[in-house]
């Protein structure tokens, strides 16, 4: 008998952590959840673990791993880009904790220890972790280095999707599902809805940016550091936006990794060309210069929770010619969400809430599958049973019902600290 136990990302998005037991136990992801009130963590791992799998670098999947390696001596497996991007995010989390006067859950030494127990596993290489269990990564097409993990034990197969994308995006061709699976643990982020046509959203974004420039304003584009910043640059440069485009914030560091691993990107030549064409902001002097005439600024953070975007936003707050272009999910209680719902933003050192007089709009460029995409993926795997994770509480039952009604696949929502035998 097998079992699965949820440690986090159960009826919520964030702090992923799942224990999969084939007789030997595996930890699938170990992340954190960044909330306005502070960081939330998954449950502690108290069992003996054979190995840890990290599906991709986003902090909600990798952010708690250095804490786990305070004590553990289990091996961990991930792709090379996942390790390199996660390392940037771990180091940055320590810096933020220091800046905010918070006590971090792990130290620089714990990060070094995490590297020591890590093994790089490239895509499409089967690895026998034990005599009975093998695992294999395939490209999940969510961000650089993201993987779908396939375990095999005896004649049974088990797929953990992590975060994935079936449809093509600007940087990735979409994941390819070749084999069926007996059991699937699937993300449910957008299990209750569809995304708008992506090409159309890209076109609308570019037209809005070009209009803003033509009216003499600044087009500010808050974007996540990992994936979205690089994707926006690729979109803008391939649409031949006629303006000075700048890249600022942590997206620059990550862009260098995208360049190093560009063989994993759909159109590496185009991405390299785009990133070369634009201006990389080096320091505060560059920032001021970039704001001297109409310009496009791609910068972190994506939900406007700190980062250089806050400085840029303050420059255009009262300029009706300029526009803020939000490009991703805006969590509850973030400034980005406040902007969309109330047309307000925090301003100045003490964060007084002020009305925004520039334009703003959200462009839905998700790196997650919509409901139809997920149903198509599940049809290909056609498992005996699907387990749902990584979705909001009110989304899960809608997705569960759709899977059972449309595909007739037995489906169960994984709840926190609940063990499911199968
Ligand atoms: Zn992700
Ligand atoms: Zn995630």
Image: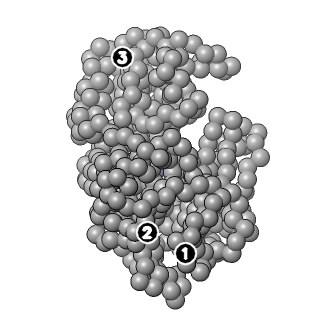
Q: Are marks 2 and 1 in contact (CB under 8 Å)?
A: yes
Q: Find residue 147 and name its label.
A: none
Q: Nearer the viewer, mark 3 or mark 2?
A: 2
Mark 2 or mark 1: which comes first in sequence? 1
User: Disc 2 beta carbon < 8 A from ligand 2?
Assistant: no
| Cα–Cα gap, marks 2 and 1 | 11 Å
Quadrant of the rendered image containing residue 353: top right
Residue 204 drawn at (x, y percent):
26, 29
Q: Is residue 246 positioned above or below 147 on the image?
A: above
Query: Which mark is nearer the camera, 1 or 3?
Result: 1
Q: Residues within 10 Å of mark 1 (few under 14, many from 20)?
A: few
Q: Is residue 205 left or right of residue 188?
A: left
Q: What whole-number distance in Å separates the C-alpha atoms at marks 1 and 3?
A: 59 Å
395 sits left or right of 9 in the view: left
- Per the image, the residue denoted by label 1 is 2
Where residue 285 appears, as percent x and y from the top left, is 51, 28
Residue at (34% x, 59% y) in the render: 408
- For the question of whether residue 110 can be seen, the reply is no
Colour style of the rendered protein structure: one colour
> Which residue is label 2 attached to?
183
Q: Residues within 10 Å of mark 3 (few under 14, many from 20)?
A: many
Which residue shows up at 64% across the image and 34% down it? 36
Q: Decide: few, some or many residues near mark 2? Use Cα within 10 Å; few <14, some 14-19, many ≥20.
A: many
Q: How many marks?
A: 3
- Residue 319 visible, this angle: yes
């Amino acid at each position: 008998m097998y079992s699965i136990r949820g440690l986090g990302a159960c009826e919520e998005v964030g702090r992923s952590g799942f224990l999969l037991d084939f007789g030997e136990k595996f930890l699938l992801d170990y992340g954190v959840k960044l909330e306005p009130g502070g960081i939330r963590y998954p449950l502690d791992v108290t069992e003996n673990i054979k190995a840890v799998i990290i599906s991709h670098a986003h902090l909600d999947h990798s952010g708690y791993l250095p804490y786990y390696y305070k004590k553990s001596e289990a091996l961990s497996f991930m792709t090379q880009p996942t390790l390199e991007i996660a390392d940037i995010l771990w180091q940055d989390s320590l810096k933020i904790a220091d800046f905010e006067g918070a006590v971090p859950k792990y130290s620089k030494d714990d990060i070094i220890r995490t590297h020591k127990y890590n093994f790089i596993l490239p895509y499409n290489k089967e690895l026998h972790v034990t005599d009975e269990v093998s695992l294999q990564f395939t490209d999940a097409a969510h961000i650089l280095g993201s993987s779908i993990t396939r375990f095999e034990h005896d004649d049974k197969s088990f797929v953990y999707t992590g975060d994935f994308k079936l449809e093509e995006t600007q940087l990735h061709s979409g994941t390819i599902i070749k084999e069926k699976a007996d059991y699937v643990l699937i993300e449910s982020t957008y299990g209750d809805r569809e995304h708008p046509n992506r090409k159309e959203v890209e076109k609308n974004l570019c037209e809005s940016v070009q209009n803003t420039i033509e009216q003499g304003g600044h087009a500010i584009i808050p974007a996540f550091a990992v994936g979205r910043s690089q994707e926006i640059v690729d979109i803008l440069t391939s649409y031949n936006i006629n303006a000075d485009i700048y890249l600022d914030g942590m997206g620059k560091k990550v862009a260098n990794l995208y360049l190093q691993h560009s063989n994993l990107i759909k159109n590496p030549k185009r991405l390299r060309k785009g990133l070369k064409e634009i201006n990389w902001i080096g320091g505060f002097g560059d920032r001021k210069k970039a704001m001297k005439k109409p310009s496009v600024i791609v910068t972190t953070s994506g939900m406007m929770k700190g980062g250089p975007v806050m400085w840029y936003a303050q420059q255009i707050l009262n300029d009706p010619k300029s526009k803020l272009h939000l490009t991703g999910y805006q969590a509850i209680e973030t400034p980005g969400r406040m902007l969309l719902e109330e047309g307000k933003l925090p301003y100045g050192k003490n964060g007084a809430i002020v009305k925004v007089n520039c334009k703003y709009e959200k462009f839905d460029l998700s790196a997650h599958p919509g409901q139809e995409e997920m149903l198509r993926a599940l049809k290909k795997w056609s498992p005996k049973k699907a387990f749902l994770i990584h979705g909001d509480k009110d989304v899960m039952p809608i997705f569960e019902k759709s899977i059972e009604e449309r595909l007739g696949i037995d489906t169960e929502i994984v709840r926190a600290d609940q063990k499911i035998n199968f």
